[in-house]
Structures are given as structure tokens and as C-alpha cells.
Amino acid sequence: MAQGLWVSLLRCGPVSGSGNGPDDEAMRRALGSLPRIDALVAHAALDAHRRRLGAAALTRLARQVVARQRDAVRAGTPAPSLDDSAQQLAAAARASLSARARPVINAAGVILHTNLGRAPLHASAVEALAASAGRYTSVEIDLATGARGARAAFAEGALASLSGAEAALVVNNNAAAVLLALGALCAGRRVLVSRGELIEIGGGFRVPEVLARSGSQLVEVGTTNRTRLEDYARAFDEAPAETAAVLRVHQGNFRQSGFVEQPELGALAALAHARGALLVHDLGGGALLDLGPLGLPGEPTVQSCVAAGADVVCFSTDKVLGGPQGGVLVGRSEAIERARRDPLARALRLGRLPLVALEATLALYLEGRAVEVPALAALHRSAEATRARASRWVEALRARGVAAESVEVAVEVGGGAFADAALPSTGVALPGDAERVALALRSGEPAVIARIANDRVLLDARTVLPLEDEALLDAVVAACAAR
């Protein structure tokens, strides 16, 4: 019986999956026909990409391309030729090169567009960068004595003066500023935070996670929509000696309305100080000018927070301040110096080039020229000026065969500031398939970032920088002509 079964198995051929059948042999041949990495990288069609990326980077991309081909062949797709593989690798190389940061025209209707680097710099900051970037710079030397000097002395002095604070410290962004303040001043102790302020900022970073990373202990206070002063007082009473600070987090990127309540900052500062604790204010946006008269209420200035009694106020320098990426701690000297002495301060310090750009930006504030900063200039530009600019664009585009039309729109501040607030603006609506035109604009040189509304591409006249009109119009004509 066993012998008969064995004979039957031999007649049926190899069991499926044994690796000895004709299908497996065909698969081995197909996989074996995939191009060798060195032959693929050396293909003549890739000469330009090899020069721009270098052999090592192109080889890494080639391995990725061949790995995808191998998976496709195993799924039943025929193996590509060497020429086809070269085309695939060329596409991967183009995608890699396009990932480099390059200048774009912001016609999207968001002034502080986080994905576009937030605030563009004033010409004086650009000139300062150009003068410093290719040369040595007196970042940390006292030119009078030749000895080592204080880093960021001008910027920190200017920030203290402009905010009315006793001292200032600059770091590389606002998240770093908050992390440093909590780590240096509150590690191992309790920090009281309203439940309505346990927010998430861009990139998925959450206030509770920042607190945990700082080594401080989060204590939630009040409710999501209403937190009263007595809620903080009860939290202090639970463990007064173990409570280091109250953290107030400004709700810059969202708004609560209706049945809501929170104590005034001054009252919160008085309570914290009466209990021997600090008030740390994560302000976020960092406005040094009151923008309420422009129709943008709800964003407290740095000066008002310092005057209300906050011991440390943390904010960004690349939002409504209008400078390069950076973060600031301003406040009482004792608290700022404790943060400065913390080892983490060295790891989070602001780099040379953003420091140079920040100094040039702050110099404009000191000189009373802050409204010249591009982000602030865009905010202050009148509705009449944007309407007239859009009309000029429409006239120029129609003269070049593009059936554009002017439309009234609203512009956002962006950058996690002034949530739900908008300014009136005027846009230009373009003809054609919106997705195709938007893609053509993004693919051009320079790239143009627009928005799509009601199946039309819109270009906002408030967010495009003053000297970009001709480049924008050329890009639009090219994009609308593309097929």
C-alpha cells in the first residue's frame, strides 16, 4: 500500500511549493534577467543624473528601483529591459532632486505658510545672511578685547528691550524654548495645565508629551471648556511644595467659543507667585505689535504677557515676528539664567545663520521699521491695494490669452496664529482643469503654490511678494498652455 502511494506521488510530479517545478524555474529566469546594479547605474541615459547626484546616491536609488522590480516580477509582472529600468531610475533621480528645498511663489492665501518656511525675510536680513554665510562672523567674540564674548548678545538685548522683560534667551524654535523652560525650571515637580490647553501643534507634537520629555509632572486642571482660578488653587493645595509652575498655553491654532472660561493671565500669575511657583506662558506666535486694529483680535503681544506677570514667555521668531526659525524665552532674569545654565540650552542654541538674520530683523523693530518686515507688510497691505494688484494681473493675463478673472477671497495668517481670523483679499481665478493647472504651476520654474476653490485655481494677491509679479504671470501663462 505504501509502495503504491509512493509511485503515485512520483507520477504526479513535485509537490507545489517544493521549488523544483517549471514555474519556479521560469521565476528564477525572470528574476535573473533583472539588471545588475552597476550596469544600470552606468547606463548612458543616466549621465546627467550621475553628475548631479553622484554615483553613490544614484546606486542607492538603483537598489530601490530593482527591489521594487523584483517584487513586481514575483507578483507576475514581466521583467523590464535595461532601458526601461534606466527610465525608472531616471524618474527616481528626478524625484530625489526635486525634494531639494527651492524658492517658490506663495499665491496660496496663507501668509505664514508652515510648509513654505513661514515668514520670508526682509532684504536687510537677506543681505546680512549673504555677508555672513561665506565668511567668518563675530558670533561669540568680543572684538574690543579679543576674548570670548556672549553669544546672541545683541538679539537677546533687543528682545528684552522690545518685550519689556528683564532678560531673554534665544534657541532654535519655540518647542525647544518650552522644553528648555520646563526642563530647567520644573524637572521632577508638578506643572499645572488647564485641560483646555493640552493641545497638539504641527507635526503631531502634543503638550503632554513635551511635559513628559522635560521630566516634569503634568497635573490637569479644570475641564476642557471651563477652567477657573479656584481650580488652580485646589491643585496647588494638593501638593504645594511639589508644584513648580503653572503652564499657560495660548490657543493660537484653534478657538473655543460658547460656554468657555479661563482666568486672566495676571490673576494666574498672582496666584502662582503667592504659592511660590512660576508662571510659564507658551505664547506661540510671538507678536511684538498689536494687530487687533487690522481686524486680527485675540493674539496677545509678548509685551502684554510680560506685563501681566509671566515669569517666562516662550514664542517663535518665524511667525508674526517675521524673522528666521528660532525660539525665545523672555522674562525674569533669575528664571532665564537658570534656563541658560541648563546643559540642554547648548543643544538647543540658535545657529549662526539664523542668528544673523534674527539680529537684522530685530534691528528693524528697534528702528521703528517693523511694518517693513514682509509678513507684517502683507498683513498691513490694504484691501484696495490687493484689489488693484489682482486687476493688473487679470489685465496682463488676458492680454496673453489666459481668460482669468478677479474674485474676492479671504487670506489666513497661518503659522498657528489667529485661528479663524482672516483678512479680506483679492484673488485671480484661472481657467482650465484645476488639478492639472495647479500641478503645472507647482512643476514650473519657479514653482507657484496656489489653492483650489470651487474647482478653480486661485492666486492670492496679498501673499505674493512685491517683486514676484512678472515671474508669476510667466508661470501662469506656461501652466495654462501646458497639455
Image (cartoon, rainbow, N blue to C red):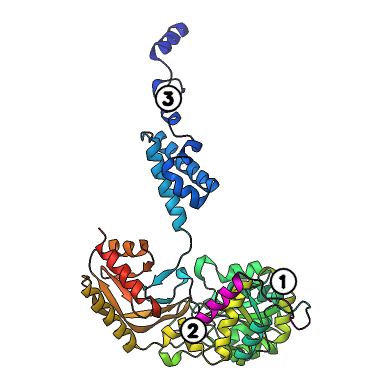
**Residue type at tag 1:** Gly
As drawn, 378 above or below 106: below
Could you tell me residue 40's position as x and y percent? Answer: 46, 39
Q: Quadrant of residue 304?
A: bottom right
| Foreground tag (2 vs 3) | 2
According to the picture, the residue beneath numbered tag 1 turns out to be 188
Q: Where is residue 252 in the image (x, y as percent from the top left)?
A: 49, 79
Image quarter of the C terminus: bottom left
Rendered location of residue 267, percent (x, y): 60, 91
Q: Decide: marks 1, 2 in contact (CB < 8 A)?
A: no
Q: What residue type is labelled 3?
A: Asp
- Residue 126 is covered by the magenta coloring: yes
Q: Which of marks 3 and 2 precedes in the sequence?
A: 3
Comparing marks 3 and 1, which lies closer to the viewer? 3
Which numbered disc covers residue 24? Answer: 3
Q: Give the range drawn in magenta.
A: 122-145
Question: What residue is disc 2 on?
Answer: 373
SS label for mark 1: loop
Q: Which of 154 and 223 is in front in this view?
A: 154
